[in-house]
Structures are given as C-alpha cells and as structure tokens.
Amino acid sequence: MSKNLDLATLQNAVSGSAAAFRCRRKLQPAGGAGDKVFPPTYAGAVYAVEQRRVPGRAEPVTCVLLDSVQSQANRMEQALQDALDAGTLKLPLIVVDFSKTNLPEPVGRLTSLQLPHRFADAILRDSEHGGKRFRESDAAKGLNAATLLNATPLYELCPTALVFGAWDSTGPKGGLGTKFERAMVSEVVGVGASINESHKNRGIRRDPLEARSSVPLIRNEDKTWTVSTDPKQKGTIRPSEVNHGSVPFDNDNAGVTIDYAEQTTTLSLICFRRLRFPVAKPVPSQIAANTAAQTVLAALGLYAATAAYESGLGLRSRCLLWPEGPMTWELLAKPGEAPEVFSLTSAESLTLLKKAVSAAKAAGVTWREEELVLTPNAELVKLVVLSQEQAKSVSGEAEAE
C-alpha cells in the first residue's frame, strides 16, 4: 500500500542516505493497445531505436524512444510555468520582456522556464538589466560565482537549473563554466516496437526567437556580436555560431506499433546532497541550511513531475498515451530492502513544496519572490526583426509559387 509523503519524511530522505525517488508506469496509446503512435525524429531523419533488456523477457526487445529526457524536462518546466501563470505557485523567474520592442510579430515575455539553457541561455546573455549586459549587471554577480559548493545564487534566481541541470557555457568563463548535473531524469519508451520506415517526415528544433541563418552577424573582439548591414561583407557568421537559431531535420518514418510504453522517472537525492548553500547568517547551522535548500529542490522536482503527469501525456500529433494505473513514487532508501511507496497528487506536492520553502526560510535560505525582468539588447532585437522579415518573405514566395 502507498503512503502519503510528508515534509518530515522528505527531509529525512534528503539528509540521510536515500538514493532517489523513482516512478515507473506503463502506458498505452489513447486509441487502445495496438494503435499506432508517432515517435519524435532525430538527426539523420530516424527514430531513436535500440535493443533493451526488459524484465520478464529472455531476449533483448526492440524499443523506440517516445519522449526524451530533454523533452520530459521541458514538459515539467511548462507545468511549472502554467502554475505560475495561474497564480498557484511562486517561484524565482528570470524574464526577457520583448513587449516594448517594435517587432513584426510580437514575442512577448520569455522566461527561464521556457528557454532551453535556463539561466545560461544566449537570450538571457544578450539582454540587459539596469543598462548593463545581464551577466555584467549587479543582479547577475552571484550567478557568475555559482558553483556546486556555492549554489545559493542559483537557488535565489533560477532553482529549476539545479533540478533539471545546466551548463554555464555562455557566462564569463565560457566552456569552463560550472556544470550542474541533471537531478530529474525522465523518459518514455515504446517497448516491443514494430517500425515502418517508408513514410517521409520533416521537423525542426525551434528557436523561440526564430533567428534566421541568413541574417549575417559580425563577431566582435570582446566576444559580443553585431548584425551586419552588408550581406556581402566578408567574415560574417551565422546566428547559430552565437547560439541562436533553429535546427531543421527530416526523416523517413510512418509511426510504430508497440506492446506498451513505459515512463521511467528518477529524482536523484544524491545529486542534491552534492550542493552547498552558504548563507550569511545560517540559522540554526550551515548544515541545516544545506539540508533545507536540498529539500526544497526535491519537493520542487516532485511537484514539477506530478503536475506534468496530471496535465496528460499528449506528446505530439498521434502520440497520446494513457497510463494503465495511478502514479506512485518509490523511495530507494536502503539497498536490499523493498522501497517505500508513496502516493502524491499535484495538490499534495504543491503543499509539500510550500512547507519546504517556509522551512528553508527559517534556516536562512531564501529565494527571490519577484521576477527579475530583463530587456533584450538592440542587436538581439535586430536579429529577431530581420529573422521575422525574412521568414515572412520566404512564406510569401512559397505562397506565390
């Protein structure tokens, strides 16, 4: 039987030696067993297919990836964004506000929950706060010093980066920037896949700003860039070379049939225990402050997962899945012993998160409660304007043909 997960149990799991929370559940196509589903396609125009060992089967089984770790993280972040928009959740958020820019097609507001690289995204890097480039502003000074042993700045401004992972490769240290391990790992796999490769399909990994590869840029000596006014100028680079732009792909596929799908989600408590959260006045101690912040991150991960699960598994067109049973979490606490099983709804996990945040405040670890709003710099706006104009021109030419 499953139990309810309370704050004391979560705190003990984080401060003790428990390895992770795990959730595994079987799924079927919404159309019923045997209905066709369409996996995502990847570079080389192919599905991600491999042979896997499956419990209960003597031989390896053909499996196909239906939703990747990265995609699952995006769905959880969207669930958090939805809760923020609905006013049911308060969470630190970095926002780039394009609403006051004169764009052909409005972009609106982009948040750190919607950007692919979270706090280290190029869109944040190329925005400003207080008249300075974001990473040179007073607001970002802490981020520039964030490490595993000093994760407080990220907790204060972008705690989701500590749950879903990030690499500060666009910061002041470039490729030497700190890497924060992904604590939340989830994927959906189709087991026993039968694949038809006769159908052609195309797709794209979309840049939210729609930066066009044909817009020429000039790389400056200080590693910034400007938009070239002369398309024939020598030495220009593409937006992709400064981390902007979409990545197109195409492939042959016709969907698959599967025996069943399985979603496997793990939330590593070991990963959180590697993080330290120094504070000016730890109350009652620095160890207590570390545990309190780690507990908040664990609660945040559990809430993100449960909220995303309850929003449904409509992965893409013709890939709507339905679970065979309710969602439960197993706590991997002691090797060789059966894990404890917990039930947790999004409402219950939200309450757990709020209690964890309050406990962290009492321990001296707090986060920013209002949005940190940035303004896109002039060159970033130029890039978006020209990209949108070229996209409109290409669309017009296609319609004329």
Image (spheres, helix red, strand yellow):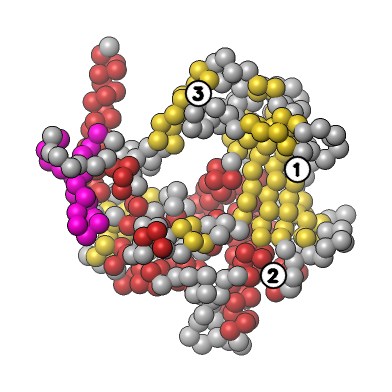
Closer to viewer: mark 2 or mark 3: 3
Q: Nearer the viewer, residue 324 or 252?
A: 252
Which residue lies under the disc numbered 3? 251
Mark 2 / mark 3, whichever is N-terminal? 2
Q: Nearer the viewer, residue 116 or 230?
A: 230
Tell me the residue at 58%/29% (across/down). Answer: 47
Vertical position of residue 116 compared to residue 316: above or below: below
Q: Amino acid at mark 2?
A: Val
The crowd level at tag 1 (other Cα within 10 Å; few <14, some 14-19, many 20+) is some
Vertical position of residue 313 compared to residue 329: above or below: above
Vertical position of residue 156 compared to residue 309: above or below: below
Residue 379 - label: none
Residue 188 lies in the magenta-colored region: no
Residue 25 - label: 1
Vertical position of residue 266 compared to residue 284: above or below: above
The crowd level at tag 3 (other Cα within 10 Å; few <14, some 14-19, many 20+) is some
Residue 225 lies in the magenta-colored region: yes
Tell me the residue at 61%/58% (across/down). Answer: 183
Q: Nearer the viewer, residue 377 or 106?
A: 377
Residue 28 visible in the current orientation: no
Q: Which residues are magenta?
A: 214-231
Please indicate whether residue 108 sits to the left or right of residue 42 in the image.
left
- Assign a secondary structure to mark 1: strand
- Assign a secondary structure to mark 2: helix
